[in-house]
Amino acid sequence: MADTIKQRPGPMRLIDATQYRLPVAAQLSILHRASGIVMFLLLPFIVWMFDTSVSSEVSYDTFTSVFTAGWGFLPGWCVKLVVLALIWSYLHHFCAGVRHLWMDATHSVSKEQGRSSAIVSFALSLALTVALGAKLFGLF
């Protein structure tokens, strides 16, 4: 009788979990949480940008010069990358949040509907990020 019982190979490790291929909706959900964390961590930077940009004309000039001259030890391109991460996190979080609200309002809970809406949400947030990133880096 004991010979017929299968033994588990052992406890699952984190490296084992990375071998699973998650569905697109699960990837979107994980990145939705990650984008919220990025926005939370960059909140002091957001407050600084807002305060500096609206305080006075001199502070606005300081704000705009950060993107070319840099800020402290950070070069200007690095500041732009941080702002690009902030742009992505906001747009991704917004698009995924609208997707969740739409699914709640319409009761769209099928597997295929979740997959297609996740793809649309990914595509929309990435397209908007590329457009605003191109504007940020002066490509148009």
Image (cartoon, helix red, strand yellow):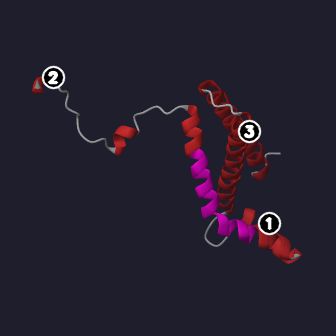
Q: Secondary structure at mark 3?
A: helix
Q: Verify CB contact (< 8 Å) between mark 1 and mark 3.
A: no
* Residue wearing tag 3: 105
Mark 1: few/some/many CA within 10 Å (<14, 14-19, 20+): some
Question: Disc 1 or disc 3, which is closer to the eye?
Answer: 3
Residue drawn at 62 percent across, 27 percent down: 110
In percent of width and height, residue 97 lies at 69, 46
Give the mark nearer the N terminus: 2 vs 3.
2
- Between the C-alphas of marks 1 and 3, the distance is 41 Å
Q: Is residue 26 visible?
A: yes
Give the amino acid at mark 2: Thr
Q: Is residue 46 above or below residue 111?
A: below
Which amino acid lies under the numbered mark 3 shown in the image of this protein?
A: Ala
Q: Position of residue 52 (x, y in %)?
A: 78, 73
Depth check: give the residue in front, 119 or 53.
Answer: 119
* Residue picked out by circle 1: 64
Is 62 covered by the magenta stretch? no
Q: Nearer the viewer, residue 124 or 26?
A: 26
Looking at the image, which is closer to me, 63 or 75?
A: 63
Residue at 53% across, 31% down: 23
Quadrant the N terminus occupies:
top left
Q: Is residue 40 magenta-colored?
A: yes
Of labels 1 and 3, earlier in sequence is: 1
Region rendered in magenta: 31-49
Q: Classify 10 Å Cα crowding around label 2: few (below 14), some (14-19), many (20 and above).
A: few
* Coordinates of residue 36 in the picture (x, y in percent): 62, 54
Relative to 6, is 103 on the left or the right?
A: right
Q: First in sequence: mark 1 or mark 2?
A: 2
Q: Which residue is mark 2?
A: 4
Looking at the image, which residue is at 76% across and 46% down?
Answer: 134
